[in-house]
Image (cartoon, rainbow, N blue to C red):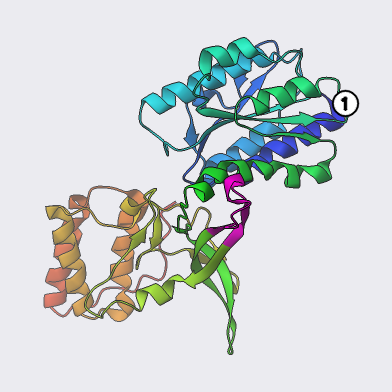
Amino acid sequence: MKGLRMTIAKHTITTILDTLGENDFVNIIAYNDYVHYVEPCFKGILVQADLDNREHFKLLVENLHAKGVGRVKNALKEAFRVLYEFNQTGQGSLCNQAIMLITDGALEDYEEVFEEYNWPDRKVRVFTYLIGREVTFAENVKWIACNNKGYYTQISTLADVQENVMEYLHVLSRPMVINHDHDIIWTEAYMDTLFNSQAQSLLLMTTVAMPVFSKKNETRSEGILLGVVGSDVPLRELMKLLGVHGYAFINTNNGYILSHPDLRPLYKEGKKLKPKPNYNSVDLSEVEWEDTEEVVIYLRCLQFIKNKKIEKAHVHKYYTAFAMKLKIELRLFLFPLIILEMFLQLNWSPPVVNSVDWT
């Protein structure tokens, strides 16, 4: 596979990656005379399809080059082995399992592979994407998909990629409509612009959504996915449900913060506010203090300084920045805070710290 076919194949892979979310797990295997993982560190495992991993895979895919002859048989065996071992560990979403085979032709149907790894239960769906205009090996590629509860499609141009890739979603959604299983999901946090009567502002948002299926009796057995309906919700609206004597935080099922009083998703660049990198994949441990004796003492000291109303809380910012930057144990800087408390009791005014450079 070279030239335009290779370009189409790479675009197909990146488009498939874009359809995945944090509840999915993925890996990419390249194959020629031998099988190798595009990321050697992920050999033999599946990794969460979060934003970081998806972008990392895209960069690696762009650097792929055609070498030798593609041996589909070995690649299929490796893919089935990884899925089986991952499923046995009880990790991942424990939901649908699928193999996306992207090829410019299959010399045979590899029936013995499927007999060994996937039949008769057919727990793993196999979706095949034939790259290019040639139809010499189309029958074999189509047979592989149809006999493993998958879907076959041929992609001849770059313009065909988006539409053809999406076909697999309709296949995976069929059991949901047949079983009347309409899940409601809340997405991870994201930044979006909210227009109101006064001004345009950048806010942290989430979306609540659910699939829409055809309920016609004549098509219900086909499991037709019509689309998705959803609504965008500013996270500050959820916070209004709380009283003034406490705070709440929301995190996703993957442990990422959706909303938290200490979540700071924006930074200022000139006069504009921009989202921080990975603002929507902040772990709960990064914004919540550990409940230890040292932390309690530290917070009491900070509260004392705050109550003394030091000018614009410069000392508070000074020591907080010191702790967060160096990530040292709190006991190492409790002593200067205690000394500071003694000075405050003597009505001593500390110097104003405008900026601190810890580099």
**Residue 200's image quarter?**
bottom right
Residue 271 visible in the displayed image: yes
Q: Residue at x 71, y 23 (%)?
A: 143
Q: Which residues are magenta?
A: 211-228
Q: Residue furthest front?
A: 218
Q: Is residue 148 left or right of residue 71?
A: left
* Residue type at numbered disc 1: Glu
Q: Is residue 325 left or right of residue 343?
A: right
Q: Is residue 115 left or right of residue 137?
A: left
Q: Is residue 236 left or right of residue 201?
A: left
Q: Count the marks: how many?
A: 1
Quarter of the N terminus within the rendering: top right
Residue 268 visible in the displayed image: no
Which percent across, then down, holds residue 206?
48, 65
Q: Is residue 295 above or below residue 311?
A: above
**Residue 169's image quarter?**
top right
Which percent across, then down, holds residue 116?
53, 12
- What SS does tag 1 mark? loop
Q: Is residue 132 above or below residue 206?
A: above
Q: Residue furthest right?
A: 133
Residue placed under numbered mark 1 in the picture? 134
Disc 1 crowd, CA 10 A, few/some/many (<14, 14-19, 20+): few
Q: Residue furthest bottom?
A: 197
- Does the magenta portion include 166? no
**Residue 263's image quarter?**
bottom left
Which percent across, then down, holds residue 305?
20, 73
In-front residue for pair 346/47 = 47
In-front residue for pair 137/44 = 137
Q: Residue at x 85, y 36 (%)?
A: 156
Q: Residue at x 68, y 36 (%)?
A: 13
In-front residue for pair 35/141 = 141
Which percent across, then down, holds residue 194?
57, 76
